């Protein structure tokens, strides 16, 4: 074997190893219906006996229903994750319906375990995400009915209805349980709370401003 060929084989081997480590683990059986009553603790949810699986384990009804947006954000989110649909367990995908009242907003947040792709069914939305350090560049666009936009995993993003009529979005996420971290709630509404002195210095504002914002959460 020549030295050049050896280097090439090593590079190919390293590439496939990287793919193996970065990709999600694949199911080793047809399905793994979540068993919320299991006492076994795993990274995800334990499987119930496949013999006991029924059609309703793979079924959810309700995404056609309009959400109640009569709240300060003008927002209602209906998730379809493994909690609502046990058959999603280990399959690496979930859905969400988001209803916006006029000028309603889905405030800046992240999904720590999922990329999200949305399709606008009704209305007009301003959407965007912010790239990571050091650029912190805002990538934003106005979407109309039928438009699609993707938010990369882990990045802070938002959606706002920019019209006087209701808006509806269907989103797909690349995880059975994507999670959501809302920036405002996490920073100003944590339990126990982050010290106001720390936040005042971090945001370069007076402590009274931090306390005022905390009161909102």
Image (cartoon, grey):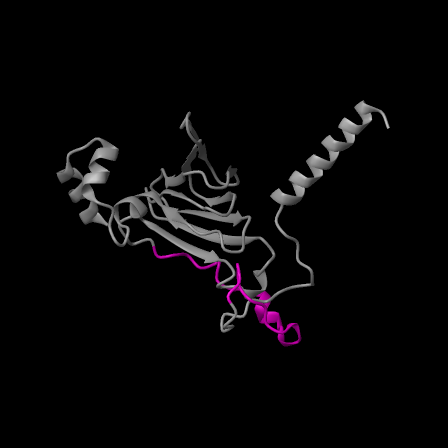
Percent x, y of residue 135: 42, 25
Q: Quadrant of residue 29?
A: bottom right
Q: Name the residue nearer the viewer: 45 or 184.
A: 45
Residue positioned most to the bottom: 52
Q: Quadrant of residue 13?
A: top right
Is residue 67 shown left or right of residue 30? left
Residue at the spot 55% in from the left edge and 48% down from the top edge:
174
Q: Is residue 148 above or below residue 73?
A: above
Q: Which quarter of the image is occupied by the N terminus?
A: top right
Q: Name the residue nearer the viewer: 132 or 160.
A: 132
Q: Name the residue nearer the viewer: 154 or 40.
A: 40
Q: Is residue 191 above or below residue 155?
A: below
Magenta region's main secondary structure?
A: loop
Tell me if residue 50 is in the magenta stretch.
Answer: yes
Percent x, y of residue 59: 57, 65
Q: Quadrant of residue 198?
A: top left
Q: Name the residue nearer the viewer: 162 or 26.
A: 26
Tell me if residue 66 is in the magenta stretch.
Answer: yes
Residue positioned most to the left: 208
Q: Which segment did they paint magenta? A: 41-68
Percent x, y of residue 119: 51, 43
Is residue 98 shown left or right of residue 9? left
Is residue 47 shown left or right of residue 39? right
Q: Is residue 97 above or below residue 183?
A: below
Is residue 203 shown left or right of residue 33? left
Q: Tell me how many marks there are.
A: 0
Residue positioned most to the right: 1
Residue at the spot 77% in from the left edge and 28% down from the top edge:
8
Percent x, y of residue 68: 35, 57
């Amino acid at each position: 074997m020549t030295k050049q060929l050896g280097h090439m084989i090593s590079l190919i081997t390293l590439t496939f190893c990287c793919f193996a480590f970065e990709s999600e683990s694949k199911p080793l059986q047809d399905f793994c219906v979540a068993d919320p009553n299991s006492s076994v603790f795993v990274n995800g949810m334990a499987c119930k006996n496949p013999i006991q699986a029924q059609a309703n384990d793979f079924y959810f009804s309700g995404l056609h229903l309009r959400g109640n947006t009569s709240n300060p954000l003008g927002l209602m989110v209906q998730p379809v994750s493994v909690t609502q649909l046990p058959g999603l367990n280990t399959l690496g995908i979930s859905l969400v319906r988001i209803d916006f009242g006029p000028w309603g907003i889905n405030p800046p947040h992240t999904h720590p375990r999922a990329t999200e792709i949305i399709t606008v069914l009704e209305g007009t939305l301003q959407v965007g995400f912010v790239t990571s350090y050091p650029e912190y560049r805002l990538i934003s666009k106005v979407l109309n009915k039928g438009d699609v936009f993707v938010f990369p995993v882990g990045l802070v993003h938002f959606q706002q209805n920019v019209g006087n009529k209701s808006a509806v979005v269907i989103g797909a996420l690349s995880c059975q349980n994507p999670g959501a971290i809302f920036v405002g709630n996490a920073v100003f509404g944590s339990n126990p709370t982050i010290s106001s002195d720390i936040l005042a210095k971090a945001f370069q504002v007076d402590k009274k401003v931090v306390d005022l914002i905390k009161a909102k959460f």
